[in-house]
């Protein structure tokens, strides 16, 4: 591991954050950040000894903010906070998401506004570096005052409480600490509050969603181009001149990618002078539809990166005489774009389903349900039922969680973001989208085979060949769920995109012409 990231001082991007989680980059605290952390920690000690009331340091929490806490109880107050707020329920979140929570929390605390002890940060980094990941239940956060419940579970292991995953096995935290000759920590004033105030649960789901949706967007263009070839559609709607007079960033990028993917295709060139005036929208309007989803993705990426480098604690400690109780913990800035991105992801599935239906209709020289012997064989009639079901399920998940708010904390926290739900729902929609894309890939490869001996372009042909290495041409009915699951693996493992990118590089084809659509 040669790359190093300095928590608290370097600019953290989505790509770097994912690389730290994957062990490709090591996160460290450099002397500059260490000095800021220690200074902030010492300022909190001054507040404790001064007896000036500061929220969460020498007062209770939420509606108990007017209750004073004695100097000798300020440490007990912090450990009680983690215990009482550990009320999450449901299945554990993915371990990668929990690890991203640790990474993003360290980066926020290391900026020196939270009064965290250096030893506490060192212990969290130990968890990251050794891949000892806390158990965090998926439900229980309302996305304001920070992601209180999930962050409390995330940091119970610091106290020797809760559970952790080690090499995929779930164990009591105290057992793992003892096995590594470590003792539970005693939290100092403000530390518990600093640990659980923040948006790291929402943020970590957003980070992973940006990566997953980026893959889905690239696949949408690639599989869409394969479907267009199977349907003998036209590449003229992707002409750069058309999109220069309605210049949305996402639309222009998709048009460039589709035009490049289809340039000099034998299939496309074989019907240049046909009497088909224009294609159905699911083919012709890919730049506009896929592009709109790309614009939503770009918005989510930009706001996620701002949040990655923000301090979302409360109160903020500038110095012992200058603290501010504000609302940087509120999840609304991410809740709204997460809900927007959920709709954007669902729409990618919506238009893909329409292309599957179009390929099964028996139009444009294709046989009905893409089989040579319809009737005896149902062919690819029924996989589109699955895409229809998944599309509808996604529509039900598109209601914006951020449009709702249920007051909590006896009315002290009277408007909450529900952004934690927004983040989880987006991943559910992407899960469904990936299956829809696998099914469209099944249709597109079958449709292309009916255009032989004509060939497409090097990138599309390489992808078709990859499909045929895993799923054979459909001669007669078989258990299509097996085929779908095979192609789903190509989608989620990145094999299809890797094949496309490899072919593009080999033939000096540039599919992306805008560096803004990257995660580093």
Image (cartoon, rainbow, N blue to C red):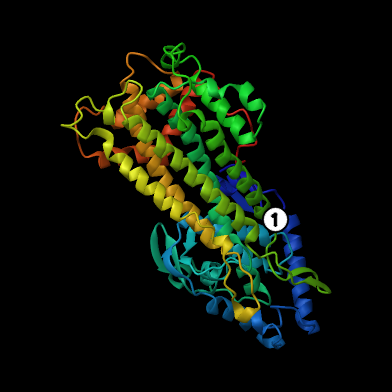
**Tag 1's secondary structure?**
loop
Q: Residue 261 at what x, y percent from top left?
A: 50, 23
Instruction: Decide which of 363, 232 is in the foreground and name it.
Output: 363
On screen, residue 477 versus residue 459, left or right, reads: left
| Viewer can see residue 102 | no
On screen, residue 468 versus residue 61, left or right, reads: left
**Residue reaching furthest to the right:** 321
Number of numbered discs present?
A: 1
Instruction: Decide which of 200, 452 is in the foreground and name it.
Output: 452
Instruction: Decide which of 40, 454 is in the foreground and name it.
Output: 454
Check the picture and name the quadrant holding the C terminus. Answer: top right
Q: Is residue 333 above or below residue 431?
A: below
Q: Is residue 193 above or below residue 439?
A: below
Q: Residue 183 at what x, y percent from top left?
A: 53, 73
Residue receiving disc 1? 8
Residue in view at x 54 percent, y 27 percent: 257
Check the picture and name the quadrant holding the N terminus. Answer: top right
| Viewer can see residue 229 | yes
Q: Is residue 44 above or below residue 2?
A: below
Residue in view at x 18 percent, y 32 percent: 377
Label 1 environment density (alpha carbons within 10 Å; few <14, some 14–19, many ≥20): many
Q: Residue 47 at what x, y percent from top left?
A: 78, 78
Residue in view at x 57 percent, y 81 percent: 80
Q: Residue 116 at what x, y percent from top left?
A: 68, 68
Q: Is residue 500 above or below residue 184?
A: above
Instruction: Decide which of 451, 194 is in the foreground and name it.
Output: 451
Q: Quadrant of residue 418?
A: bottom right
On screen, residue 223 versus residue 447, left or right, reads: right
Residue in view at x 66 percent, y 76 percent: 188
Q: Quadrant of residue 69?
A: bottom right
On screen, residue 208 versus residue 168, left or right, reads: right
């Amino acid at each position: 591991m040669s790359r190093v990231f300095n928590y608290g001082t370097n600019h953290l991007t989505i790509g770097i954050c994912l690389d730290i989680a994957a062990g490709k980059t090591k996160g460290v605290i450099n002397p500059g950040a260490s000095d800021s952390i220690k200074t902030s920690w010492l300022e909190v000690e001054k507040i404790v000894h001064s007896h000036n009331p500061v929220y969460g340091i020498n007062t209770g929490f939420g509606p108990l903010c007017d209750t004073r806490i004695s100097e000798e109880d300020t440490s007990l107050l912090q450990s009680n906070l983690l215990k009482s707020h550990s009320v999450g329920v449901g299945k554990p979140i993915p371990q990668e998401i929990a690890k991203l929570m640790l990474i993003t929390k360290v980066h926020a605390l290391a900026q020196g506004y939270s009064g965290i002890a250096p030893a506490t940060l060192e212990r969290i980094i130990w968890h990251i570096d050794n891949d000892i990941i806390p158990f965090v239940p998926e439900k229980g956060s309302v996305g304001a005052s920070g992601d209180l419940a999930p962050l409390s579970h995330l940091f119970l292991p610091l106290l020797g409480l809760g559970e952790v995953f080690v090499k995929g096995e779930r164990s009591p935290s105290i057992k793992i600490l003892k096995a590594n000759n470590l003792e539970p920590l005693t939290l100092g004033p403000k530390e518990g509050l600093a640990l659980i105030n923040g948006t790291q649960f929402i943020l970590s789901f957003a980070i992973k969603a940006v990566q997953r949706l980026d893959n889905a967007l690239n696949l949408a263009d690639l599989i869409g181009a394969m479907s267009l070839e199977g349907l003998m559609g036209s590449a003229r709607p992707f002409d750069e001149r058309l999109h220069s007079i309605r210049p949305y960033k996402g639309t222009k990028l998709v048009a460039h990618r589709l035009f490049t993917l289809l340039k000099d295709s034998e299939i496309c060139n074989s019907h240049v002078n046909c009497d088909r005036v224009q294609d159905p929208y699911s083919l012709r309007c890919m730049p506009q539809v896929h592009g709109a989803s790309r614009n939503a993705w770009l918005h989510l990426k930009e706001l996620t990166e701002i949040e990655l480098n923000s301090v979302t604690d409360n109160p903020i400690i500038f110095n012992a005489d200058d603290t501010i109780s504000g609302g940087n913990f509120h999840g609304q800035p991410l809740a709204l774009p997460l809900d927007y991105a959920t709709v954007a992801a669902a729409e990618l599935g919506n238009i893909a389903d329409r292309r599957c239906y179009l390929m099964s209709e028996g139009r444009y020289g294709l046989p009905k349900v893409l089989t040579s012997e319809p009737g005896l064989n149902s062919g690819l009639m029924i996989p589109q039922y699955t895409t229809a079901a998944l599309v509808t399920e996604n529509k039900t998940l598109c209601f914006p969680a951020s449009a709702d708010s249920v007051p909590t904390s006896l009315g002290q926290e009277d408007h909450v973001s529900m952004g934690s739900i927004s983040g989880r729902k987006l991943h559910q929609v992407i899960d469904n989208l990936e299956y829809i894309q696998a099914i469209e890939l099944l249709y597109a490869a079958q449709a292309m085979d009916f255009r032989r001996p004509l060939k497409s372009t090097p990138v599309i042909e390489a992808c078709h060949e990859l499909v045929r290495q895993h799923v054979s041409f459909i001669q007669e009915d078989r258990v299509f769920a097996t085929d779908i699951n095979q192609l789903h693996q190509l989608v989620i493992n990145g094999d299809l995109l890797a094949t496309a990118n490899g072919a593009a590089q080999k033939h000096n084809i540039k599919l992306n012409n805008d560096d803004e659509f990257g995660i580093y």
